[in-house]
Image: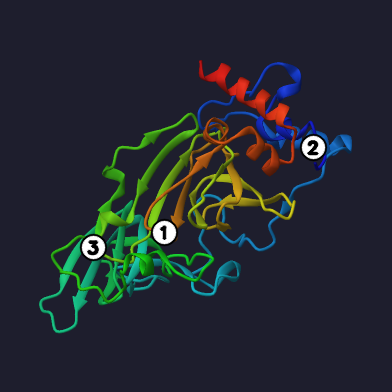
Amino acid sequence: MASFDPHLLQRLFGAGMTNGHGWAGMSRRGVRVGWPERLRASQRAGHARAPMLDEDAPTEGVAGGGWSWSERVAPFGVHDVRVQHHTLAGVAHGASHRCRATGWGMVISGSAVLEMRRENHRPARYEHLEAGDVWSVPSSVSAWFHCNENEKASVVALIGGREHDDTGFSEQTATGQTADVPCSMGESFRHRLMEQPPQSTSWGRLRVVEADAFSDPDALSAALVEIDPGCCTDLHWHLNTSVWQICLDGTGSLLRFPSDGRRPVSVMRAGTVAHVQRAEGHFIRNHGSDTLRLLEIFRSDHYHDLSLPQWLAAASPETIAAYLCIDVGMVAGLARVQDRRAS
């Protein structure tokens, strides 16, 4: 059994198991105090390994809304994915008049017109999208965004299909769906995400949109995450696919737990793109005084996450102990603390 640092849980979640106070500030899905302050104190004391700044994570983008990039080609070594950002204007002043819209994306701010045309189909179809609206247009439809006069818009898109599993088969292959599946222009290509009631959590709010909201057979799933100031999500995992994290507003940090033992930290601010591998533990903290807003895009037709409290409740102590490289008795202690907090 690998050795376990008894201060690890304290650094991650606040006051730990050793002081008798349980999970400091932690409730069902959130942590209100914890790892950054204690980690810095541990580093000053000389008994903690510093987390690594993720050198792969693009750090362009200025807090307060700056986006200094227009396209990420094959970011993080994922060669079948492009992440695009476009600033549009009806009367262009350094902005584009129009951009392609085939694929999956979201209007971050402003408003724009989605124009769609199919081969040999007339007339064209037009949809007016507002901030927070999500679209998914299949590859068989030609689509563009443009702004009317005096309009402006900021849009972000992920171009790339669903993630292939380890056997080389994608979810669309397993279901028999392909991009050539016929679709009607009368079907839905838009979802008004902000009209959807959010799921409330101890750390903020969550809105999820899955592939069945669209007529696109290759549609992805996504989540709009809002983390309140001073709050932090639970340590959690997405077991079905990797996740692309795009920071829309605010300032925070993403701490990942890859299998190689590193603890890379990505600084999150408006315009930053980060990537979390499938089944890689991670959590996100809001360091600022404003809400931290993130768009999480999943290369899957559905959203799935597993938080630490859920895992403690569902998995065997032996499984958890083997994964975390800790003693089975400590897992039992974690479960007792969680039970006390739940009651």
The kind of residue tagged 1 is Ser
Find the distance from the CA under tag 3 to the CA under tag 2: 49 Å
- From this viewpoint, is residue 313 visible? yes
Of 282 and 45, which appears nearest the observer? Answer: 282
Find the distance from the CA under tag 2 to the CA under tag 1: 35 Å
- Residue occupying the point 48% across, 29% down: 202
> What is the number of the mark on residue 300?
1
The colour scheme used here is rainbow
Find the distance from the CA under tag 3 to the CA under tag 1: 15 Å
Q: Residue 123 falls in which quadrant of the image?
A: bottom left
Q: Secondary structure beneath disc 3?
A: loop
- The mark that comes first in sequence, 3 or 1, is 3
> What is the number of the mark on residue 215?
3
Left or right position of 225 against 308: left
Q: Give the class, few, some or many, for how many residues have Cα within 10 Å of label 1's Cα (few <14, many ≥20).
A: many
- Residue occupying the point 68% across, 17% down: 21
Left or right position of 273 against 318: left
Q: Give the class, few, some or many, for how many residues have Cα within 10 Å of label 2's Cα (few <14, many ≥20).
A: few
Residue that numbered label 2 is attached to: 4
